[in-house]
Image (cartoon, rainbow, N blue to C red):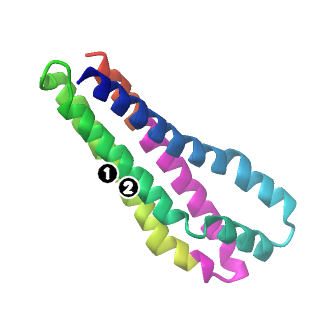
Amino acid sequence: MELIRWILAVAHVLAGAAWFGAMLYSLMVLHPRARSFFVNVRQLEEFISYLAAGARWKVLSGIAFIGLTGAGLIFCSPAGQPSSAQWVILTVKMVLFTAAIGVFCFASWVLWPARTLASVEEMAKFQRKFRFIAVALILLVGASIGLGVVSSYL
């Protein structure tokens, strides 16, 4: 059982770190570099759309993997059941993770289609919204990861 717990823990941490790292890279490296490369805002948006095409389902698959491995870790707790302090932290972690999923889904199914149909004049507004969403997701996922680490030390 301990081997299964270690495999789940490694998979859970790596998947969470991959999501966190991809968002951080996109916000801090990819988008700023693309903005400096493309002078024409329409070309920039076409490039970003090309990169993002099909990513929604890959991200949601990764999110499902994170959730399943996290649930597996709860059920493979070495002490049987998490302590009450761990339950509080894990509940907050799950709320933050669920909020991140909600923000991602809102951006994917509501804002993204509007962004792809936006006029050139509206694009700057959507770029600001997506930067805000990226920061929010990084904070939510980062806090969720941090709480997972804290809960493992209780």
Which residue lies at the image location 28% right of the left edge and 45% below the top edge? 95
Q: Quadrant of residue 38?
A: bottom right
Where's the N terminus, which quadrant? top left
Residue tagged 2: 101
Left or right of 80, for residue 21? right
Labelled pair 2, 1 in contact (Cβ < 8 Å) = yes
Where's the C terminus, which quadrant? top left
Image position, residue 70 (x, y; %): 30, 38
Left or right of 136, for residue 119? right
Left or right of 18, for residue 154? left
Q: Is residue 117 above or below residue 10?
A: below
Q: Amino acid at mark 1?
A: Thr
Q: Amino acid at mark 2?
A: Ile
Gap between marks 2 and 1, in whole Å? 5 Å
In the image shown, does 104 or 74 lie closer to the viewer?
74
Residue tagged 1: 98
Magenta span: 115-142
Image position, residue 152 (x, y; %): 30, 21
Left or right of 135, for residue 13? left
Tell me, yes or no, whether the highlighted magenta stretch contains residue 140.
Answer: yes
Q: Is residue 147 visible?
A: no
Image position, residue 87 (x, y; %): 18, 30
Q: Which mark is residue 115?
A: none
